[in-house]
Image: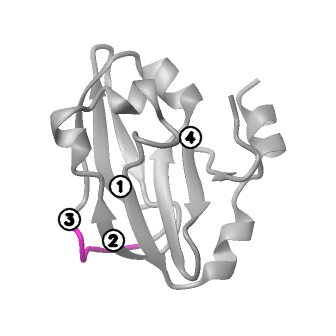
Amino acid sequence: MIPEQLRYTAEHEWVESQGGSVVRIGITDFAQNALGDVVYVQLPEAGTEVRAGDVVGEVESTKSVSDVYAPLTGKILSCNDELSESPELVNSDPYAAGWMFDIEVEDAGSLTALLDAGAYAKLTE
């Protein structure tokens, strides 16, 4: 399942415009499936300045621990606090309830440099 309206990274994060310069970030269905049952999610603090490619958190599953990267440069606006109590939302609903954090990006145009659904599908074949 690869929603057409989202953009993607090679590190298996999805990015969704929230309007203006704000984007929402999560990990893809492909990533959560590869991880297995998610048991813990560490997220960045609101207000943190991030650069594209920075490690900003991690996801721990019954199989492994994986880093979460900032796909774009900007400032963390908010995080999904639900994940501290219910990390399994990353598995059950990765594109909605399992979202991770919002970033106010420096350059809203940088979103177009990310992979579209077709390119991400090829990456995951």
Contact? badges 2 and 3 (CB < 8 Å): yes
The x, y position of residue 67, in whole percent, is 36, 42
Given contact means CB atoms under 8 Å apart, are the residues at marks 4 and 3 in contact? no
Q: Nearer the viewer, residue 68 or 82?
A: 82
- The quarter of the rendered structure image containing the N terminus is top right
Q: What amino acid is found at the position of numbered circle 4 in the picture?
A: His
Which numbered dot is residue 45?
Answer: 3
Mark 4 vs mark 2, foreground winner is: 2
Q: Residue at x 46, y 32 (%)?
A: 93
Q: Secondary structure at mark 2?
A: strand
Q: Secondary structure at mark 4?
A: loop
Q: Which residue is mark 4?
A: 12
Asked whether 74 falls inside the magenta stretch, the response is no
Horizontal arrangement in the rendering, residue 97 relative to residue 114 (left or right): left
Q: CA distance from mark 2 to mark 3?
A: 7 Å
Residue 21: name its quadrant.
bottom right
Colour scheme of the picture: one colour
Please indicate whether residue 60 sits to the left or right of residue 30 in the image: left
Task: Tell me the residue that label 2 is attached to.
Answer: 76
Q: Are marks 1 and 4 in contact (CB under 8 Å)?
A: no
Q: Which numbered disc, 2 or 1, marks the residue that appears first in the sequence?
A: 1
**Do the CB atoms of the residues marked 3 and 1 lie less than 8 Å apart?**
no
Q: Which residue is mark 1?
A: 55
Q: Amino acid at mark 1?
A: Val
Real-space Cα separation, disc 4 to disc 3, in angstroms = 21 Å
Badge 2 amino acid: Ile
Query: Mark 4 or mark 3, which has the lower sequence index?
Result: 4
Quarter-wise, where is residue 18 in the image?
bottom right
Amino acid marked by disc 3? Glu
* Range of magenta residues: 45-50
